[in-house]
Structures are given as structure tokens and as C-alpha cells.
Image: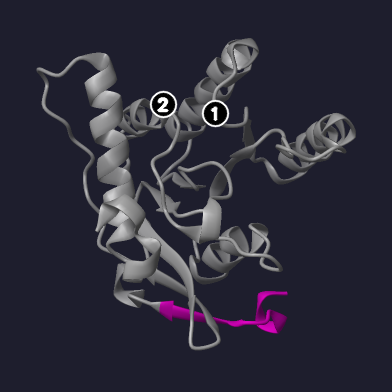
């Protein structure tokens, strides 16, 4: 399927594509009209030879659209079926909603269980969790940095990937892996914020300047 994609897939930083290494591959949620988000995951999966476990949204929210009241429950059903069939972990949508706290905790435990019982676990996720205006990278919702620190504490390094279009190609630029760390003396909120900023800055460094937003 990815071979027939238009624009064609172009891979940069091949030397940083992970293999046999516990890690989480993080990429920006690039989009534009006519370019669907699932191409991001398909592109990464096409070049990473190890089996990956994806963390995906469990619901599409369709903000501002009249059909949201139908689309939301339908998307929950479809994504639940996909998660069961392909062993994804469904995470409640961003930004966090109070009613999703229980489901979010269950999803986090599922991910940590996968890491614990899998040799060389490899996760894939888009930290922003949704489309952004003009495809420009932005800070994720609160809690993402804390989740990243949990993954780091479980022994996973982080591999950043920048997704964008250039010269008629869909580009995935892999960067060097790193260990996610923040100072111990910070408050929980500060740790969450700083960890999220580190994650997004490493992704933004791999993007064209026009897509980096506040991460130049």
C-alpha cells in the first residue's frame, strides 16, 4: 500500500532507524487537506522492520462539525475493533476529558504491561494526538510528558521522527535516539511540561523551519 502512495515516501536519517532496541518512536501529527494521518503510521511501519505496538486515539472527536454526535460513537466502535484486531492500545482523545480518566489509566497500564512482557518492545505514537493548523508542530496536552517519563522509566529510549512534505515527496526524517530525563527537583507539573517540550523539540529539529512553530 505504501508503495502506491502519492506523494511518494522518502526516508532520511536511515542510520537512525531503530532495530532490536527498546524504544518509542515519536513523530509529529502532520496533516493537510487530502493527506490523512494514517499515512504517518504506515510510513513508519514500512521502514521499521521490528514489530511495533501503536498507541492510537480511541475516539475521533470532529470538533466544530455538525456530524460529531454520530461520528464520535462510530469512531469509538471502529477504533476499538482495530485495536483488538491489530493489538493497538487505544488512548482517550486529547485534550483530556474528566470522564476519560479511568479509561486513560487502563490504557497506560496496558502499554506498561506490553513493555514488561515483550522482549525489545517498540512503541509508536504521535505525541500531539491530533491535527494542528497548517501542520505546524505544537505542544501536546498535559500528561504527555508524564507518560513519556513513565516509558523512559520502563527502559525505553526515544527515537524522534519528523514528518513533512518536500519537493513532491512525503518525508520521514529519523533522528538519533535519546534518553528522556528531567531534573529531579521539579514539581510534577513542571516535569510533565519539560518532558513534553523535550520530546517535541527533538521532533521539531527534524522539520523544515516553516513547520517548527514555537520550537525554532
Please give the count of numbered marks on the rendered protein: 2
Is residue 19 something that shows in the picture?
no
Compared across the picture, whether 35 is left or right of 43 comes to right
Left or right of 189? Residue 166 is right
Of all residues, the one furthest to the bottom in this rendering is 167
Q: Is 74 in front, or is 14?
A: 74
Q: Is residue 92 left or right of residue 76?
A: left
Left or right: 112 with respect to 42?
A: left
Residue 152: where, in percent of width, then height?
A: 29, 35
From this view, report whether residue 208 is shown above or below residue 160.
Answer: below
5 within the magenta span: yes
Could you tell me residue 172's position as x and y percent?
45, 71
Q: Height in image: 170 above or below 59? A: below
Question: Which residue, given by chain and number where applicable, does mark 2 sit on?
Answer: 142
The image position of residue 213, as x and y in percent, is 35, 55
For label 1, the SS is loop
Identify the residue at image location x=71%, y=68%.
Answer: 34
When asked about the image quadrant of residue 121, the answer is: top left
Magenta-span inclusion, residue 171: no
Magenta highlight range:
1-11
Residue shown at the point (62%, 27%) measured from the top left: 92
Q: Earlier in the sequence, mark 2 or mark 1?
A: 1
For the residues marked 2 and 1, what is the alpha-carbon distance in whole angstroms? 8 Å
**Residue, x 31% and y 68% (percent of image)?**
16
* Residue beneath disc 1: 95
Q: Is residue 76 visible?
A: yes
Image quarter in which the N terminus is found: bottom right
Within-10-Å neighbours for mark 1: few <14, some 14–19, many 20+: few
- Observer-nearest residue: 49 or 12? 12
Amino acid at each position: 500500500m505504501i508503495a502506491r502512495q502519492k506523494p511518494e515516501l522518502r526516508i532520511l536519517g536511515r542510520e537512525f532507524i531503530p532495530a532490536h532496541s527498546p524504544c518509542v518512536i515519536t513523530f509529529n501529527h502532520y496533516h493537510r487537506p487530502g493527506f490523512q494521518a494514517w499515512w504517518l503510521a504506515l510510513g513508519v511501519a514500512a521502514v521499521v522492520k521490528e514489530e511495533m505496538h501503536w498507541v492510537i486515539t480511541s475516539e475521533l472527536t470532529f470538533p466544530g462539525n455538525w456530524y460529531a454526535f454520530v461520528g464520535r460513537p462510530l469512531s469509538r466502535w471502529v477504533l476499538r475493533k482495530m485495536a483488538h484486531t491489530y493489538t493497538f492500545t487505544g488512548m482517550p482523545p486529547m485534550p483530556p476529558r474528566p470522564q476519560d480518566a479511568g479509561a486513560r489509566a487502563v490504557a497506560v497500564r496496558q502499554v506498561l504491561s506490553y513493555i514488561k512482557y515483550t522482549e525489545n518492545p517498540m512503541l509508536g505514537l504521535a505525541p500531539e494526538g491530533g491535527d494542528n493548523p497548517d501542520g505546524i508542530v505544537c505542544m501536546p496536552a498535559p500528561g504527555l510528558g508524564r507518560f513519556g517519563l513513565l516509558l523512559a522509566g520502563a527502559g525505553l529510549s526515544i527515537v524522534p521522527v519528523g514528518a513533512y512534505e518536500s519537493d513532491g515527496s512525503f518525508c520521514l526524517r529519523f533522528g538519533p535516539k535519546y534518553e528522556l530525563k528531567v531534573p529531579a527537583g521539579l514539581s510534577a507539573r513542571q516535569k510533565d511540561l519539560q518532558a513534553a517540550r523535550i520530546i517535541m523539540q527533538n521532533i521539531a529539529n527534524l522539520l523544515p523551519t516553516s513547520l517548527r512553530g514555537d520550537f525554532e
